Amino acid sequence: MAQAKTQRDERRDIPSTDQFGRQWHVVIELKTGDPCHLGPAQWSDPLHTPVGRTQDGSYIVTVPKSPFGHSLLGQVVVDFKAWADVQRREDQNWKLNLFNIAQDTYKGKFDPRELENDEYVMHLAGPRPWPPVAVLERVQRNKQNDPLVKQFLGLAPMSREGRHLLNRLTVEDFEALAAVGDNPTDVIPTEYPAFVKYMIEKKLAKTIGDAAQLWQQHKAALAEA
């Protein structure tokens, strides 16, 4: 009597490489040759690349197909243009929701340019879609001499600048920023108005908007500490 096949018998692991030279773990169905699992293989992914369907039903990570419809095994493509497009739409929806919240809160008496400095409204709006569109667009351009692109792709260690652009500064980063001031023992304020004032006085932020963005990152860093 023939032994029943297991799921493992019907699938195969295919070591694969994307257009950036990164290794991927790909599992395919033997009957169809189509992938049923994709994931980074032995490299960190600072962008948390979505390997399943996005909210609009598209796929960011795919195994390309030949003109004849066969999967090109051993290859993976990460579509940063499609990903940036998805994030751009999500960001616009988030902004529209932010404006609607401000409309309900202030009865139309608000400045759209200042909303992201409003801690209360930002709290009601929830986290902004991540990763930032600007980062995805930067990777999409893929300038080989851009060290930050290599960091975002997980091909080089993340720097403080890279974490800042990703809105992922750590508590250690903020402590280092505080040490830029005249007194290395400065304590970063834990209240929003004092934090904004501190960042501007220490010239760690040029505008209230810049300080507000740092505040959001600071809160996230404390939550993860």
Image (tube, rainbow, N blue to C red):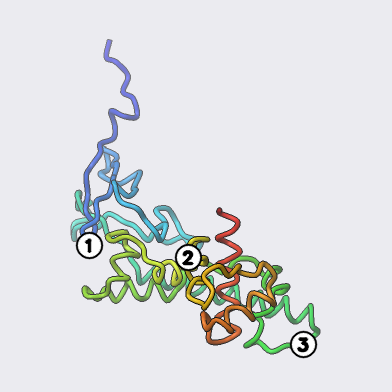
Task: Say the numbered circle drawn on residue 173.
Answer: 2
- Tell me if residue 160 comes above or below residue 106 in the rendering: above
Residue 129 spot, x, y in % from top left: 53, 67
Question: In the rendered image, which quarter is residue 223 located in?
Answer: bottom right
Q: CA distance from mark 2 to mark 3?
A: 38 Å
Quadrant in the picture for the N terminus: top left
Label annotation for residue 19: 1
Looking at the rendered image, the disc whose residue lies closer to the viewer, 1 or 2, is: 2
- Which of the two discs, 3 and 1, labels the residue nearer the N terminus? 1
Q: Residue at x 60, y 66 (%)?
A: 127
Q: Could you tell me residue 85's position as x and y percent?
A: 43, 73
Mark found first going from the N terminus, 1 or 2: 1
Q: Amino acid at mark 2?
A: Asp
Q: Measuring 61% from the left and 64% from the top, which residue is drawn there?
A: 219
What residue did someone put label 3 on? 108
Circle 2 SS class:
helix
Sequence order check, earlier mark of 2 and 3 = 3
Q: Nearer the viewer, residue 58 or 142?
A: 142
**SS for dot 3:** loop
At label 3, counting other C-alpha atoms closer than 10 Å, the crowd grade (few under 14, some 14-19, many 20 or more) is few
Horizontally, is 193 left or right of 35 in the view? right
Task: State how far apart marks 3 and 1 are (Cα).
Answer: 48 Å
